[in-house]
Amino acid sequence: MCSVVVARIIGTSSSMTTPGTAACSPFLGFCGVYGPSAVRTRTQNVPGWDVGGGFRVRLKSFWVVAETRYNVAATRYHPTTFVPVVVGIAW
């Protein structure tokens, strides 16, 4: 187990958050709302921790490797957790 600092970036990019112009095209068969997009982001730098493990198996002239980790970041309202899985080969 080791201590880590996690940077979390939360953002949206959507044209539905600001007023726009509605347009329908009978030729294409759809309607849409078009307008300027709103981009909002927020960054948090918080402490966190992780634990994990993996293995490596030799197959003839190369290695097959796999690793997984359980990561936790102590974000403001609820801890953010994620489990990345890495699979690969080495030679």
Image (cartoon, rainbow, N blue to C red):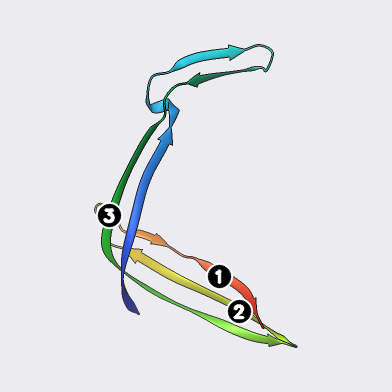
Q: Looking at the image, which is closer to me, 58 or 38?
A: 38
Above or below: residue 51 compared with residue 29: below
Please name the residue that numbered disc 2 is placed on.
65
Please name the residue that numbered disc 1 is placed on.
86
| Residue 71 placement: quadrant | bottom left
Q: Amino acid at mark 2?
A: Val
Q: Position of residue 58 (x, y in %)?
A: 68, 87
Real-space CA distance between mark 3 and mark 1, rounded to the nearest whole angstrom:
26 Å
Q: Position of residue 40 (x, y in %)?
A: 34, 38
Nearest-to-viewer mark from 3 and 1: 3
Q: Which mark is residue 44?
A: 3
Give the farthest residue toward the left: 76
- Secondary structure at badge 1 equals strand
At 48% from the left edge and 21% from the top edge, which residue is drawn?
34
Q: Amino acid at mark 1?
A: Val
Which numbered disc, 3 or 1, marks the residue that appears first in the sequence? 3
Is the C-beta separation of discs 2 and 1 under 8 Å? yes
Which numbered disc, 3 or 2, marks the residue that appears first in the sequence? 3
Q: Position of residue 82 (x, y in %)?
A: 43, 62
For mark 3, does the 10 Å Cα neighbourhood hold few (<14), some (14 to 19), or many (20 or more) residues? Answer: few
Real-space CA distance between mark 3 and mark 2, rounded to the nearest whole angstrom:
32 Å
Q: Amino acid at mark 3?
A: Gln
Above or below: residue 11 compared with residue 51: above
Q: Position of residue 24 (x, y in %)?
A: 58, 13
At 26% from the left edge and 61% from the top edge, which residue is drawn?
46
